[in-house]
Image (cartoon, rainbow, N blue to C red):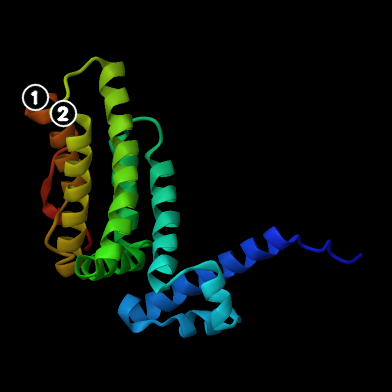
């Protein structure tokens, strides 16, 4: 029995998904600056015109990948502050998602030099900060505990802490003590008095090795 024919919208969506899959592979292999629209089209088995009919530019193609990544990361946050879950996700950032995170950092540097890309990237992270800030505000209100700072400020600090630790660990993967992310996050969220006794840094062990 022949497969049902795809509608125009379904066909377009399928093409878009294949292009994004190919783009992720090509960017991972060549970097954002080293990859071209032609490379992505060839990897996906389409013409360059197919890329431009779905994405205005290489910038927009990469931003669509970031949209996918942020959507997954926001979903992983869940509806509570489970530090064990957050720590496990951070470990995955260093392993499974390492290439995409490095590409995102590369795009950050590109965006700093290109105003249109900078604003598009900033808009996406503003939305992510809003989601995280709402989660934090709900948690502190539900648990009736004092917030160390306004929720939007705390969202920025938590994100910056994770990004900075990721970069430092990529440069020197054997230097960071095991448990540093969870212990630091706990201090940010609860302060010295509210920190959980089990969330401490083990100076004798490292993140990797």
Where is 68 relative to 80, above or below? below
Q: Residue, x 69% and y 65% (percent of image)?
A: 11
Give coordinates of residue 158: x percent, y percent. 20, 43
Q: Position of residue 134 (x, y in %)?
A: 32, 30
Q: Residue at x 56, y 71 (%)?
A: 53
Which of 180/147 is in front?
Answer: 147
The vertical placement of 68 against 81, above or below, is below
Residue 41, can we see it? yes
How many numbered dots are placed on residues in this image? Answer: 2
For the N terminus, the quadrant is bottom right
Q: Quadrant of the C terminus?
A: bottom left
Q: Residues within 10 Å of mark 2 (few under 14, many from 20)?
A: some
Q: Is residue 206 visible?
A: no
Distance in Å between CA atoms under marks 2 and 1: 7 Å
Asked whether, in this view, residue 120 is left or right of residue 19, the answer is left
> Which corner quadrant of the image does residue 148 belong to?
top left
Secondary structure of the residue carrying numbered label 1: helix
Q: Nearer the viewer, mark 2 or mark 1?
A: 2
Q: Residue at x 53, y 81 (%)?
A: 41
Q: Quadrant of residue 45?
A: bottom right
Q: Residue furthest top?
A: 144
Q: Position of residue 78 (x, y in %)?
A: 41, 36
**Disc 1 marks which residue?**
193
Is 14 left, or right, of 92 in this rendering? Answer: right
Secondary structure of the residue carrying tag 2 is helix
Q: Which residue is labeled 2 in the image?
A: 190
Q: Which residue extends farthest right?
A: 1
Query: Marks 1 and 2: in contact by CB < 8 Å?
Result: yes
């Amino acid at each position: 029995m022949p497969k049902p024919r795809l509608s125009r919208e379904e066909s377009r969506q399928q093409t878009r998904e294949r292009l994004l899959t190919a783009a992720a592979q090509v960017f991972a292999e060549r970097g954002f600056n080293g990859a071209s629209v032609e490379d992505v089209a060839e990897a996906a088995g389409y013409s360059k015109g197919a890329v431009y009919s779905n994405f205005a530019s290489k910038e927009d193609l990469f931003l669509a990948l970031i949209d996918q990544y942020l959507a997954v990361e926001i979903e992983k946050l869940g509806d509570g502050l489970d530090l064990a879950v957050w720590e496990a996700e951070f470990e995955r950032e260093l392993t499974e998602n390492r290439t995409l995170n490095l590409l995102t950092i590369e795009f950050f540097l590109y965006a700093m030099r290109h105003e249109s890309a900078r604003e598009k990237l900033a808009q996406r992270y503003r939305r992510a900060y809003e989601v995280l800030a709402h989660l934090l505000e709900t948690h502190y209100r539900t648990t009736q505990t004092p917030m160390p700072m306004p929720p939007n400020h705390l969202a920025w600090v938590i994100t910056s802490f994770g990004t900075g630790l990721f970069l430092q660990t990529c440069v020197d993967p054997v230097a960071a003590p095991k448990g540093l992310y969870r212990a630091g996050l706990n201090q940010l969220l609860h302060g010295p008095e509210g920190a959980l006794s089990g969330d401490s840094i083990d100076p004798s062990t490292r993140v990797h090795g």
